[in-house]
Image (tube, rainbow, N blue to C red):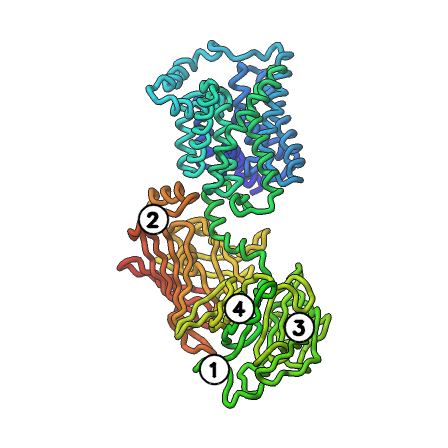
Amino acid sequence: MKWKIIFQRHLHGLLFSYSQIFFARSLWFGALLLITSMLHPVIGVSGLLAVIITNAVAESFTMNPLSIREGLYGFCSALVGMGMGAFYHMSWIFLLVLFLISILCLLVTIVFQGFLAKYQLPFMGFPFLVSFWVLLLSAKYFANLSLITAESYPFLQEFLNFRDGFNDLNLPEFLLSFCRSLGAVFFQSNVLVGMCIAIGLFLYSRISFSLAVLGFSSAFLFYKIAGIDTRDLVQYFVGANYIFIAIAIGGFFVVANTWSYTTVIFLVPIVALIHYGSTEVLSVFHLPAFTLSLAITTLFYLYLLKWRTDGNYIHAVQLQYSSPEKNLYHYLVTKDNYRFAKYFPISLPFWGEWLVSQAHNGKITHLGEWSKAFDFVLTDDEMKTFYPPGDRVENYYCYNKPVLSPGEGTVEIVVDNIEDNVIFEVNTKENWGNSMVINHGNAIYSQLSHLKSGDFKYKTGDFVKRGEIVGLCGNSGRSPEPHIHFQVQNTAKVGSKTMDYPIASYILRKGSFFDLKIFEKPNEGDLIRNPEINPLLKNAFNFVPGKSMRWSWKGRFEDWTIYTDEWNRINIWCAATKSIARLENDGVICRFNFFEGDRNSILYHFYLSCYKVFLGFYSELIVRENYPVLFKTNILVQWLEDITAPFFHAVKSEFAIEYFFADDLQYTTRMELRSVSASKLAGIKLNKLNYVIHISTRGFEEIEILEGEKKTVAVCVSQ
């Protein structure tokens, strides 16, 4: 078993080493690139041997198995090996030097990886550059290591002549240069080699391919404008520098969007300046610049991004999927979460449904530095705040009602010595009345004011949890009638300047309809309440680590395992279909943010049907969300979306879930949710799936899947 694991690791490491050259992580793409490198068999075999040697030595020194498997140690060695096969004639001394230089490349890789990791920067192609420069400088002392010539491999000449015949194709200068530049990455400035790489790159990533074309086009145009000979582009790595910088900065290290594409256009001339400047310096030592300009520009740019104060336009990739598409789609799924992550979750400070009598920028007292506050009152069906005669505080519905802590924290200040006002009289001397200020950490404080004296439940220094009763609604301070004044501020002083801060989640009622609001700010006149979580839904969507589920569908079973990964993310894994779905649950919303695997699995349909679920039940409530990726559509449409996604969504994919039925709102034992997933292109429906989700006290019962006239049922056997 141990040798099987090692073999699989090295097979993956070999293929990933080739795909890593193009910032990719793909076995089939790596295999295609390996085969393509064999269009010059000596160059291909040299690169293959270099990777095998590097990974074997890394294994013998017990280096990081994951780095071996991911090809991080091998991709620079592949370039070194192919370069050596292109420069020198294969012989026994050649094989000895190849062995030594492969080990050196591993050592240099580890040094650069360790040093640049401190700054969270990639080591790029520096190990290749250093190792190959050492080889070129030292090779002149090896009398038995001869340079390659046209007569070196007579038995290959006929095949190589056939391969090189593609260079004479009647193609536009730009296309010939682009393909030959790609081929030059494998030290084969050949159209056929470049075409194979270009096809593989397009099949792996449409964004990478479009960026490669953009980067090379920008360089081609700049060369024409600057008067640089465009024939330089087909030399070793010259044109490839512009292709690689485009992929790296346009979609690999940075989320692909209009700004990243624009950045590529402006960075290309800088890469050219660095390339020709470094070429002049290195010519003193008779060394080619290779990928030096790419490595320097990429590191400088990524380091610059770390010093920004505003990341609204250029978004650095936080979790690397080694695919511009996956990086982009993951960002689109989670961008709201990233946006909300900066907020401490603040809840409404009351039970039941209250009216916002004054919101932000109110016309009465919420003005100037104190404009970002809320006033809340209770009303009856006629929207009155009191019952007759209304001349005493006790006549007001909100008076004496519990006031809740809007979030966990430490009580910073309690003011509790001010009498309630007579109705329509105000105490301007003690403006805020009885108040409590709670410190939520990170300079976030909440203030509750106009409370009733003598009924505070906590004192200064006490710790309170969200939703705990801290006092009662009163009419103290500048308060003509009972209400709760609520504001968020960044200092502990009562009456501090207010902050423009949203409510984490609340239910807005309009007539008989309900709407769920997430990190928004209510308006004056809104009837709002804290979301009430339904125990049945809470239990069903409680995916705790170690939990397992078994589903039956179309005569087969799927077994799921729930676990949390090293980033503490909740994952559902299906070994049978090799599929994974990732979700997050904040106690109010359960939302999927990633799926990879078999699109004919139950897990995929579960992902689609329960993409975003509010864990409370309100009759006829509909929760909507947009999918950032397509589902169950043809590959051409998927490719179209990949190409346009950095700029706009040609395909609109939408999700909606309706809270259709519950047998009892208080003691629910059965519930039915209905969801729909639909995608459209220019208003034309591409696909639509309807789901009916049945939930009981034991959890999920079954999911009905309706695709057109076809209906299938997935049954949850155990959970």
Q: Can residue 19 be seen?
A: no
Q: Is residue 597 left or right of residue 632?
A: right
Q: Rounded to the nearest whole Å, what is the CA distance between mark 2 and mark 4? A: 49 Å
User: Vertically, is 332 above or below 212?
Assistant: below
Name the amino acid, label 2: Thr
Query: Which residue is tagged 4?
Result: 362
Label 1 with label 4: CB-CB less than 8 Å: no
Q: Rounded to the nearest whole Å, what is the CA distance between mark 1 and mark 4? A: 20 Å
* Residue 515 place in picture, x, y as percent: 43, 68
Quarter of the image containing the N terminus? top right
> Nearer the viewer's eye, disc 1 or disc 3?
1
* Residue 496 place in picture, x, y as percent: 66, 65
Q: Residue at x 50, y 31 (%)?
A: 244
Sequence-wise first label, 3 or 4: 4
User: Vertically, is 601 above or below 289?
Assistant: below
> Nearer the viewer's eye, disc 2 or disc 1?
1
Secondary structure under the numbered disc 2 in the rendered image: loop
Query: Which residue is tagged 1?
Result: 384
Q: State the mark number for residue 436.
A: 3
Q: State the mark number for residue 633.
A: 2
Label 2 with label 1: CB-CB less than 8 Å: no
Q: Rounded to the nearest whole Å, what is the CA distance between mark 1 and mark 3? A: 27 Å
Crowding at mark 4 (Cα within 10 Å: few <14, some 14-19, many 20+): some
Name the amino acid, label 3: Met
Secondary structure under the numbered disc 4 in the rendered image: loop
Sequence-wise first label, 2 or 4: 4
Sequence-wise first label, 2 or 1: 1
* Residue 119 place in picture, x, y as percent: 65, 40
Sequence-wise first label, 1 or 3: 1
> Nearer the viewer's eye, disc 3 or disc 2?
3
> Nearer the viewer's eye, disc 3 or disc 4?
4
Secondary structure under the numbered disc 3 in the rendered image: strand
